[in-house]
Amino acid sequence: MTQKEFEELTSMREILQIAIKREEEAYHFYIRARQVARTPVEVEMFTKLAEQESQHKKALEDQLTEIDAQLEIDRALSYDV
């Protein structure tokens, strides 16, 4: 892996970490909104939106895991044996 590819992965990692945090914030926003919802339709809508944010977070975490694995493989391969 080239230095540029390594730097891009690192930047992608940072972007994913920020995105994960934003998904968590959105999830909590919808949970709070659900608590003050006035109708069953609102409760259902905010519940679904919270679930979607949770799924988005999981997808981003999966991507982060893949990047971390690739970085670890590249570190291992870069050692002289």
Image (cartoon, helix red, strand yellow):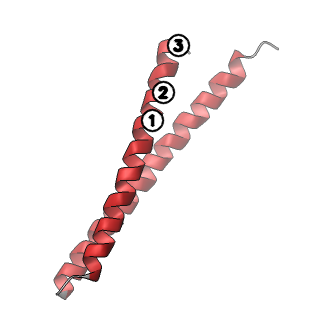
Query: Is residue 56 something that shows in the picture?
Result: yes
- The tag on residue 46 is none
Name the amino acid, label 2.
Answer: Leu
In terms of secondary structure, where does tag 3 sit? helix
Does residue 20 lie above or below 70 as drawn?
below
Which is closer to the viewer, label 1 or label 2? 1
Please tell me which residue lies in front, 59 or 3: 3
Horizontal and vertical percent position of residue 37? 21, 82
Residue 73 picture location, percent across and down: 65, 28
Disc 3 marks which residue?
3
Q: Residues within 10 Å of mark 3 (few under 14, many from 20)?
A: few
The type of residue carrying mark 3 is Gln
Q: Residue furthest right?
A: 81
Pointer 1 residue: 14
The residue beneath circle 2 is 9
Residue 81 image-quadrant placement: top right
Residue at figure coordinates x 17%, y 87% from the top left: 39
Quadrant placement of the N terminus: top right
